[in-house]
Image: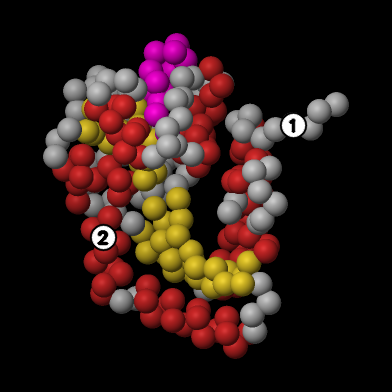
Amino acid sequence: MLVNPIQGRTQLTHNDVQPIAYLITEPMVAVVRADSPLKTGKDLVEALSKNPASYSIALTSTGHRVSIGLPLHKAGVNIKTVRMPAFKGGGETTTAVLGGHADVQITSVSTSVPHVTSGQMRVIAISSSKRLGGIMATVPTWQELGFQSSGSWKAVMAPKGITPAQIAFWEEVMRKSAASDEIRQYAEQNQWLLEFKGAAETKKWLDEEFAALKVIMTELGLVKQPAN
């Protein structure tokens, strides 16, 4: 809803729907095989700063490219020079890394949990603003490593033009849902962050995030420039 219109993939934007509530922030992680020499995300950034071809990064979306592009950009690495094979889904990127066909996987934190728990893979950095618990407790955040990154988010939208009363009704439904034990336990299980925002606050956040992503994605070379 944010990156696709910035890239010109769709004319639909967040202004064409009515935000109801922001529910969940899902961090992105950089994952390697358990036997990888990379210990933290800083090792990856430093290696690619010296030699952009030294490691390949498997991903599936522009959001993943932004997530890893931010720390690389700060280090002065041109992400166009880094090998970033694109796959159709997280299962393919996992297979690529486990099979030795790629060195690093960028994915959502919940996708990585089963493979980290099994001991097959290891997370070297996470886009969360703070360290997570459980299996991710020892994983450093990009922020504490000295870099910025970004994650994913889950929100509820409604058709544009619904009434204020309808907005208020569904916002309250989502507020109660976000406060339920069922959602809290599910979020903990998947290493998601419950960060509820109401309709007005969600709209404000979407506006700010859209503007920030437009600047960031342009700097990363992910926005097509108009032909002269």
Q: Residue under label 2, please give it.
A: 188
User: In the rendered image, is residue 28 in sight?
Assistant: yes
Residue marked by disc 1 = 225
Confirm or deny contact between disc 2 and disc 1 (CB under 8 A). no
In the displayed structure, does residue 205 sit left or right of residue 117?
right
Circle 1 crowding by C-alpha within 10 Å: few under 14, some 14–19, many from 20: few
Amino acid beneath label 1 = Gln
x then y, percent, for residue 109: 32, 46
Residue 53: which disc?
Answer: none
Alpha carbons under labels 2 and 1: distance apart:
41 Å
Give whichever of discs 2 and 1 has the lower sequence position. Answer: 2
Quadrant location, the N terminus: bottom right
Q: Position of residue 119 (x, y in %)?
A: 14, 35
Relative horizontal placement of residue 224, taking residue 133 as reference (left or right): right
Colour approach in the figure: secondary structure
Residue drawn at the location 20% of the way across and 39% of the way down: 116
Up-down relation of residue 144 to residue 77 (above or below)? below
Q: Residues within 10 Å of mark 2 (few under 14, many from 20)?
A: some
Residues 129 and 67: in front is 67
Q: Which residues are magenta?
A: 43-59
Q: Secondary structure at mark 2?
A: helix
